Image: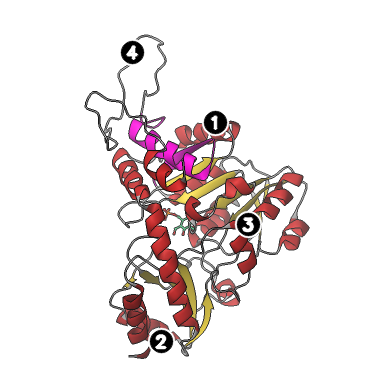
Amino acid sequence: MEFETLCLHADNNIKDEWGTLTTPICQSATFVHKGVDVPSDYSYSRLSNPTRRHVERLVAALEGGADAYAFSSGMTAITVSMMLLKPGDHVIANDDLYGGALRLFRNVNALNGLEFDFLDTSDIEAVKAKIRPNTRLIYIETPSNPLMQVTDIRKAAEVAHANNAWLFVDNTFLTPYFQKPLELGADIVIHSGTKYLGGHNDTLAGFVVASTEELAKKVLYYSKTIGGQLAPFDSFLIERGIKTLPIRMDRINENAGKIAAYLKNEKKVRKVYYVGLPEAKGYDIIKEQSKGFGGMISIEVESKELAEKILSDVKIFQYAESLGGVDSLITYPMLQTHADVPLEERNRRGINDRFLRISVGIENAKDLIEDLKQAING
Ligand SMILES: Cc1ncc(COP(=O)(O)O)c(C=O)c1O
């Protein structure tokens, strides 16, 4: 089956007495045993739940993984996947990651005995130079959040595997519709399903997709031990969102290209970070490893005052955190997604008081451009 068809039919296995087409929301915490010691797929919903299992199998099929597990948020998915490491293990991570992931790594995992090096992983030689005998993981987002650094997934996987380490890729920004990290050698794919997979800003969700049964078993062990699984109703919402993933991503991709082209020529915009611009660093790599550029654009405008004016004057774009939904959003990473990154580091990397991040939605591109124009120049 092609990807668009998989989004609807990857897990067509519901066979119930009513002939249900839409996945039923199985709102049951526990399941009646069939007999003493008789095996059954479901016993308790922290281990497995029919509605959640359905969306897990769907996401596993879309990413080409052995299996997937769904969690109550992207952060839970990252937390559970980091349990695969043990104290004393060394991790090489992008220095440009979602702020919550950086906070987890630095303020929780590092205090519990993991060792970290943070760097621009688009520089593969720099990654190689940081490898230590105890390196067990390379962790990346590509494109990264919010500076849109592009890391060569295939090369990062080669470096990891040559050193007995794993490669984890947070594929939230591009989704498997555009980019399939497991096919390029990654061991685990992580999603904030809150974003494009759900697509409607109406629920939080997270996924861990494992490349092999062996890794999947480990993830399931930590999942059932820690908890934090996706609830049945939220599983239903994410599955419903995924049905339209390809058409949403196509429109978002097209809109973002038009908006980035406008922003590039807007005088008061000093810098445009968009991986679909041919002059963008990493453009050749992303063209090779992804079928699209996605809908995330960051900009640096000429002054703090202008950044604040844009946030208060946009009418169609909404000034709100998050990304990946049908509605276009604009956010101020300095105060929101990256507020916990130390000031000096933020400034050094350019996430300053002139820096805004845009998540392009599915509205008409002309309206979106007009909205930005009036907010910038009005
Ligand atoms: C790339 C990325 N990964 C993970 C997360 C965390 O996901 P959640 O907010 O669903 O916990 C986010 C949140 O913005 C994100 O942008």
Q: Give the distance between the C-alpha atoms of the residues marked 3 and 4, in whole angstroms.
A: 47 Å
- Location of the C terminus by quadrant is bottom left
Q: Quadrant of residue 280?
A: bottom right
Is mark 3 in CB contact (under 8 Å) with mark 4?
no
Q: Secondary structure at mark 2?
A: helix
Q: Position of residue 155 (x, y in %)?
A: 70, 54
Q: Give the distance between the C-alpha atoms of the residues marked 1 and 4, in whole angstroms.
A: 24 Å
Q: In this figure, which residue is indicated by the disc labeled 1?
A: 217
The numbered mark, 3 or 2, whose residue comes first in the sequence reads: 3
Answer above or below: position of 53 versus 255: above
Q: Amino acid at mark 4?
A: Lys
Q: Position of residue 377 (x, y in %)?
A: 37, 90
> For mark 4, does the 10 Å Cα neighbourhood hold few (<14), some (14 to 19), or many (20 or more) residues?
few
Is mark 3 in CB contact (under 8 Å) with mark 1?
no
Q: Amino acid at mark 1?
A: Lys
Q: Is residue 63 magenta?
A: yes
